Amino acid sequence: MWVTAVLLLAIGTRLPGLSWAPPPINQDEASNGYDAYSLLETGKDRWGHAWPVILEALGRGDFRPALYAYLTIPFAAWLGPENLVVATRLPAALWGVLTIGLLYGAVRRVSDARTAFWAALLLVLSPWHLQLSRFGHEATLTPLFPIAVVLTLSLAGWPLRGVGSPEGNCVRLRWVWMAALGLVVGLSQHTYGSMKLFMPAFLLFGAVLYRRAWRPVLRDGRSRLGLALSVVVAGIVLAPLIHLYLTQWSTVNARAMQESLFHKGMPVAQLIGEIGGKYLRHYDPQWMFVRGDVVWVQSIPGVGQLNWYMLALLPAGLAGLIRQWRANRAQALLLAWLLLYPIAGSLTTSGPHALRSACGLGVLQWIGAIGIRTLAGTASAAGSKRRLGAAVGVVAALAVNAWYTGRQYFVTEARSPFYQALFQADLCEALTAIRDDWRGYDRIFISDHVSAPRPYWPSIQPYVYPLLILPVPPAEFQSWEKTYHYRNEQDQFHTMDTMGPFVISAGRTVLEEHFRTRAHERALFVFRPGDLEGGRLLHVIRGPGGEERFHIIEVVPMAGGPGSRE
């Protein structure tokens, strides 16, 4: 019953309101969603590559695994082209609920049902996981995989609790679950770049930790078959990716090489200091409990990556974990998981980074659940009054923090002018307003006007928004003539200039050229206030505070001749 309640709470906090919380829609999400729509309609991504393993998303340095886009395809087909924003986020939400369920299963098999319940509940209430599991980004997939590795190993019969137990000395692995393990390991590499570092390190540590189990495993023929099958399945799943690494290494890893500290030309001592500092900042109370990630779209305003009560639960959990070390070898695996999750974020310029370190979600809540059990045991030994007081304190802390996190996410962030602008919700609203009319114009201009700090007008890859919101049929986009440029040789993200009838610019030179050579065309302008003088104002898009964010302006030829306009 309690597990069902936790899963219902997970569904209730992950699935509703995906069209507005967070505000629609980040450019990375839009890119994934449109590629999914393109694959559904044409069997190709938007650049015309048939059933790709990686997606060339927003430039020569932005190649990303295609798994998230493939997971989005059924939802794009189900909800239709007019609901691509929700279709893009729905896989993340459902994946988040699945991750919570798998965490319960893994903890129950390795520990006990009560610890499993608390771990699942803590993950449901996690602000980090809440933000991640409502965000249509490939990094949302990563928390599931280390959890799934532990669960499939347990179901396969691997002696996670320790080889010293009688059952551990007679290991017989179930080949079906070993095949599932191979699938999990292989798919993890198709999610997000951080898993390319974390998963091999996690498996290597596990292999060393359970080295005493290898002899009984290798003695048993059925176990050898299961082990071989897991390697074969992982190899099959990884084969397309390995081929790309062997043939297109610099292309596939362009983003990683751009972000990596190893490519910044630092002296060795400085490099070690940078890596060490970024690693330790993953455990900084400011990052964990107060400020959260510096990248605003990756954390909830006014909330750290973890709930406040984890500040007490994690030390208690670590104390309980160490006490159980000899009785349950899996506690050492949890410690390794805790120490390894910041690897990817520590080796890049922008660490700590909530997406690159998302594989730590699960182990932090697992240790927190051990902390609850440890504190409960201490309170139990102290008498019934203290036991009742401890129970009331835990429930109160969970409730207060859940209320505050929910309020910050579903009210403050969803309605914040800053977050509305950051997710370019105003551009989405403007494009929705012209959804039925844009084909009646020869040219559609989209503003690239950026301003800061007030009013805050970001313009981050604006070309991908009409593709997703209108939407533009993928076959049509693939056939359009396109022009784009890079601002400099180091820039890894392109800037789209034109695509078919769309012009992504509010530049004075571009406008003068248009009115000099194309004044006979019907033109529609989705521009910031002040970008264009004249024309007929059709719509005004306002922000949450009533401020004007976009003007939709029509300019058509006058009857007097091709050089005049109204």
Image: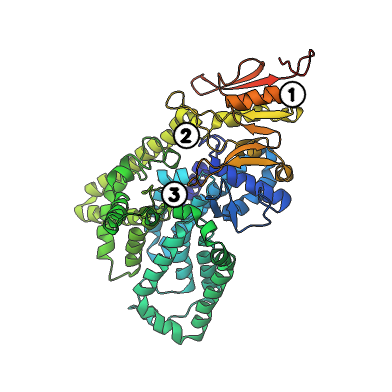
Q: What residue sits 33% from the left and 65% below the top?
A: 331
Q: Nearer the viewer, mark 3 or mark 1?
A: 1
Dot 3 amino acid type: Leu
Report how far apart the C-alphas of labels 1 and 2 lie in the structure.
41 Å
**Residue named by callout 2:** 410
Q: Earlier in the sequence, mark 1 or mark 2?
A: 2
**Residue named by callout 3:** 355
Mark 3: few, some, or many residues within 10 Å (few <14, many ≥20)?
Answer: many
- Residue 166 point in image, percent of width and height: 36, 80
Report how far apart the C-alphas of labels 3 and 1 lie in the structure.
44 Å
Depth check, front residue: 19 or 243: 243
SS label for mark 3: loop
Q: Nearer the viewer, mark 3 or mark 2?
A: 3
Q: Earlier in the sequence, mark 3 or mark 2?
A: 3
Depth check, front residue: 54 or 399: 54
Mark 2: few, some, or many residues within 10 Å (few <14, many ≥20)?
Answer: some
Q: Nearer the viewer, mark 1 or mark 2?
A: 1
Report how far apart the C-alphas of labels 3 and 2 lie in the structure.
20 Å
Q: Is residue 212 left or right of residue 65?
A: left
Depth check, front residue: 194 or 347: 347
Q: Is residue 59 above or below residue 83?
A: below
**Residue named by callout 1:** 522
- Residue 463 point in image, percent of width and height: 61, 37
- Residue 376 in view of the camera: no
Q: Earlier in the sequence, mark 3 or mark 1?
A: 3
The numbered mark at residue 231 is none
Q: Is residue 376 left or right of residue 302?
A: left
